[in-house]
Amino acid sequence: MDEPDRTLDAVGARLKHLRLRRDITLTDLAAETGISASTLSRLEAGLRRPTLEQLLPLARVHGVTLDELVGAPPTGDPRINLRPITCSDGSVILPLTRRPGGIQAYKYVLPASADDREPDLRTHEGYDWVYVLNGTLRLVLGEHNLVLTPGEAAEFDTRTPHWFGATSSGPVEFLSLIGKQGERAHVRAAPKLD
């Protein structure tokens, strides 16, 4: 199997990851792209190879480049190739990992928000680790309303209803590591010195 074949065979997993990250159904994606839900399902399962006519609308709705969608090898300095995703609420998501599967890393920048903003709690499969870089992060986790400041971290099962937001004190920047259900980060502690 040559490199173009391997590249095209890996697109299905990326398509599924992008759709699940946006928390939308195949039916919703079909409505956004004009590609039938059954075709999208076959593409995600690797039972059908995508065409350029299918990849273009999929890249557009997922907010990624064609290179990112097909997993083309990066060129030059990877720090320059990172592409932020700007959301309608003014937040920015910067993917920090490029490989499909495994733990995915993201940097989030959320704009200032009202302290009494009603959270829109969500759930999904996975496990999340959050570390605050700058600002104040409001994390609603189930019945708990937590406020995290720079240097503080939280970890939780994403099947627990959760929501992230900034406070009225200004924007917040934080890192998020998201893994599949049951996948946990491996923390190694330094040996105790006597």
Image (spheres, helix red, strand yellow):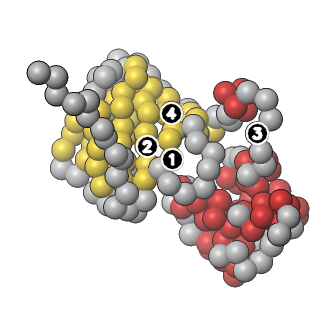
**Mark toward the start of the polypeptide (4 vs 3):** 3
**Label 1 – label 2 distance at C-alpha:** 6 Å
Amino acid found under the numbered disc labelled 1 = Gln
Quickly name the residue at label 1: 104
Residue 47 found in image quarter: bottom right
Pointer 3 with pointer 1, Cβ within 8 A: no
Q: How far apart are marks 4 and 2 (CA)?
A: 9 Å
Question: Could you say whether the residue bearing mark 4 is in a helix, strand or loop?
Answer: strand
Which amino acid is tagged 2?
A: Leu
Estimate how packed mark 4 is, as few (under 14), some (14 to 19) or many (20 or more) residues with alpha carbons within 10 Å. some
In the rendered structure, which amino acid carries the disc numbered 4?
Answer: Lys
**Element type where label 1 sits in the image:** strand
Distance Cα–Cα, label 4 vs label 1: 10 Å
- Indicate which label's residue lies in the foreground, 3 or 2: 3
Q: Which of 186 and 18 is in front in this view?
A: 186
Using residue 36 as the reference point, say whether residue 130 is left or right of it: left
The residue shown at (43%, 39%) is 176
**Helix or strand or loop: what does disc 2 sit on?**
strand
Q: Which of marks 4 and 2 is nearer the N terminus?
A: 4
Q: What residue type is labelled 3?
A: Pro
Q: Name the residue under label 2.
A: 177
Instruction: Work out whether mark 1 precedes mark 2 in sequence or the reverse, and give the earlier one.
Output: 1
x, y (%) of residue 167? Answer: 34, 26
Asked if disc 1 and disc 2 are in contact, CB closer than 8 Å, the reply is yes
Asked if residue 91 is positioned above or below residue 3 in the image, the reply reads above
Q: Label 2 near label 3: C-beta < 8 Å?
A: no
Q: Mark 4 points at which residue?
A: 107
Q: What element carries label 3?
A: loop
Residue labelled with disc 3: 74
